[in-house]
Amino acid sequence: MEPKTLLITGFMPFGSEDRNPSWEAVSALPERIGDWLLKKLLLPVEFSRAADLAEKAAEDCHADAILSVGLAAGRTAVTPEYVGVNVRDASIPDNAGVQPEGEPVDPDGPAAYFSTLPVREMTKAIQGAGVPAKLSYTAGTYVCNDLLYSLLHRFSGTTVRAAFVHIPLEKDLPLNESIHALTLAIEVI
């Protein structure tokens, strides 16, 4: 069987952080997991630009699926995201200095999209391995949600499926557990 292509993305550091465990976890993954050939992409923490780069990379590598990973400081579990909402509302500027308040991601888009990868099954697989995980119903309104909504909007009606997973800071969950969680999530896609 021909391997399928998974575009998996992580983010650069942002805010007061000098490291971003989302990229550290993604870059530590092997090149292949199960039937999936992984194509890794480091994204800037910037509204619109992160999504534009991910969409182009997905098209260029003919991705069958896209799994984006981001940091959720304050959370203590790995949280696959169930929904992306059509709003940008930032409490801090992104890395380009942009700080939208109550703006739509896409003025012509629907209010929300549901993830098209099996996030509930991902959550159960991670929990089953003893790693803290919880299904999340909000990806927030920062760049992570902007990316998730944009990908789901762009690939709506196509065979390309997408989802987003938040991981905690390393002080709240060791990086090796986040890496293990992502591996498990990919195995159930």
Image: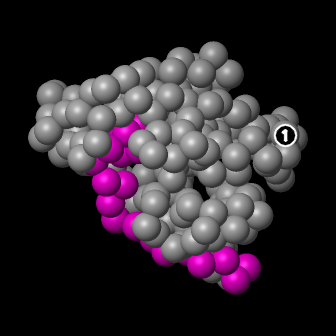
How far across and how far down the image is residue 38, in percent? 76, 38
Q: Which is more toward the observer, 95 or 135?
A: 95
How far across and how far down the image is residue 167, in percent? 56, 60
Left or right: 27 with respect to 139?
A: right
How far across and how far down the image is residue 92, in percent? 28, 42
Residue drawn where x is 51% and y is 53% of the image: 71
Residue receiving disc 1: 31
| Circle 1 Cα neighbour tier, 10 Å, few/some/many (<14 / 14–19 / ≥20) | few
Give the quarter of the image for residue 121.
bottom right
Residue drawn where x is 69% and y is 68% of the image: 174
Q: Quick check: is 136 in the magenta stretch?
A: yes
Number of callouts in the render? 1
The magenta segment is 129-151
Reply above or below: 51 against 84: above
Reply above or below: 132 against 86: below
- Element type where label 1 sits in the image: loop
Amino acid type shown at disc 1? Glu
Left or right: 176 with respect to 146?
A: right
Q: Which is more toward the observer, 174 or 30?
A: 174
How far across and how far down the image is residue 11, in percent? 55, 38
Does any portion of residue 65 appear in the rendered image?
A: no
Q: Quick check: is 10 in the magenta stretch?
A: no
Reply above or below: 183 against 135: above
Residue drawn where x is 20% and y is 43% of the image: 89
